[in-house]
Amino acid sequence: QPATRRQFLGLTAAAGLALVSGCSGREPSAAGPPTTGGLRLTAAPMRVDLAGHAVPTWGYGTVPGPEIRLRAGEVLRVQLENELTEDTTVHWHGLAPPNGMDGVPGITQDPVAPGEGFTYEFETPIPGSFMYHAHVGMQLDRGLYGPLVVEPRTEELSYDREYTLMLDDWRDGMDDHAGHAAPAGDTDPDPADTVSFGGRAYPLLLVNGRPPEDPAVLEARAGDRVRLRVMNIAADTGFRFAIAGHRLTVTHTDGMPVEPTTVDALRLGMGERYDVLVDAAAPGGVWQIGVQPEGRGGWGRALLRYTGSDASRAPEVGERPAELAGQLAVYDDLLAREPLALPNGTPDRRYDLVLSGTQIGGQSYPDADPLPVAEGEWVRFTMRNTSAKWHPMHLHGHHFQVLTASGRGPVKDTVAVPARGGEVTFDFLATNPGRWLFHCHNHHHMEDGMVRLVEYG
Ligand code: C2O
Ligand code: CU
């Protein structure tokens, strides 16, 4: 309600000051961000090494692709080259560029044909942890993705080192799965697909492109405060994330700041990100960073290794952190540090959308009506999920605020709507005109038509 919201807006400033205390003032990336001018991304066939198996796939040179880093207010300028055998584009997941730079083929730009290129160029005023990925068919599922970090002009958080962790599910390349590269656009409807997030065959779970047998190792010194940017880029898998022997202090979700909240584990729908701080206060060993799919079997991991510790003390591949079953970060417990500047009163426009099967509001793309809004409006979406699967719903071009009992729910761009009657409401301000996708970030669901267009301007 308006008064409450105002009150919370007032509180935000004070809470912000509280967070700054304890800041050492150092710049975590003192070396400065790589210059963004002239950066080139080449989408091409490549091989990825999965514990000794050289698996053919598509990527931007490495899987994940190179981390793009820039500073708030800078201009992102990326030259995409397409060396694939089909059209491609790049979408900047979580950023809110002008519509023509959003990377949706046939909607915001012409697809980039094989042998051709396209230059993306736009300002990035808002800091945070974002991702980039191909937005054609199932290309993302093959490895056409990477992390994108926009650093604030002044870092409020104090930490000693930082790592980005991208969580992925992987279809191909191990033993009997070798060579079964799914053709792009293959939606592979699976009658056994009944578990909460997906259920298709994803025999491998990768952290930064590495299988559990050959994990990424994060180094820390005893006493360090480590910042992790955890990102779920999987096509079909929601994850739990935890670190044995350590708790996680959530500072951001989807790049947007929240009041620091300490939990045991995260749950990330596809497309979601969490930034956490971890105090390296359990020295003398190597700790499992566990990544467990929601609603199905399988397992992924990385390692947290204290400098100087004995690598032979590394945990076994399958040893799971007890923290995975501990307290989760949930939307209801998160408080936005920078709530959206919503006006007084009530929303100008509301959409109540039932998510059933892979339909949004009873419609399936492309046979779906656009959802019109008008520039400047305060828009409210309510999603009620009547299906047996979670749907992580993502809105392009905007940040929205999840409506929670506190009135100050987290500001995000992707929100997981629980299965079997789960409901989530969010608000956004229509301040970025264009034709924007609103879709499920389960890429199979998206390919099956779980997409609507939000249009204005
Ligand atoms: Cu990562 Cu259309 O989205
Ligand atoms: Cu879905």
Image (cartoon, helix red, strand yellow):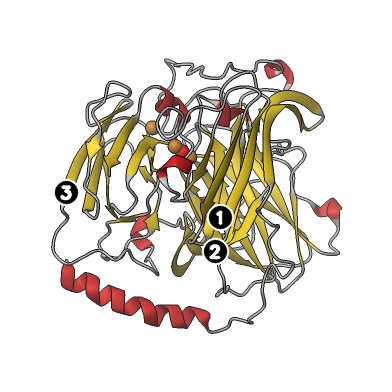
Residue 349's tag is 3
Coordinates of residue 50 in the picture (x, y in percent): 75, 31
Q: Type of residue at label 1? A: Glu
Task: Please give the name of the residue rendered at 21% of the width and 47% of the height, measured from the top-left corner.
Answer: 374
Residue pointed to by mark 1: 323
- Mark nearest the camera among 1 and 3 is 3
Q: Amino acid at mark 3?
A: Arg
The residue to which callout 2 is attached is 72
Residue 239's spot in the image, x, y percent?
52, 43
Q: Position of residue 159 (x, y in %)?
A: 64, 72
Which secondary structure, mark 2?
loop
Q: Report, in whole angstroms, how far the alpha carbon at label 2 lies from the one at label 3.
A: 31 Å
Using the rendered view, name the quadrant where residue 167 is placed.
Answer: top right
Circle 1 packing at 10 Å, graded few (<14), some (14-19), many (20+), is many
| Residue 202, above or below 244 | above
Q: Residue at x 77, y 69 (%)?
A: 221
Residue shown at 57% from the left, 56% from the top: 75
x and y, in percent, of residue 370 in the image: 25, 32
Give SS at disc 3: strand
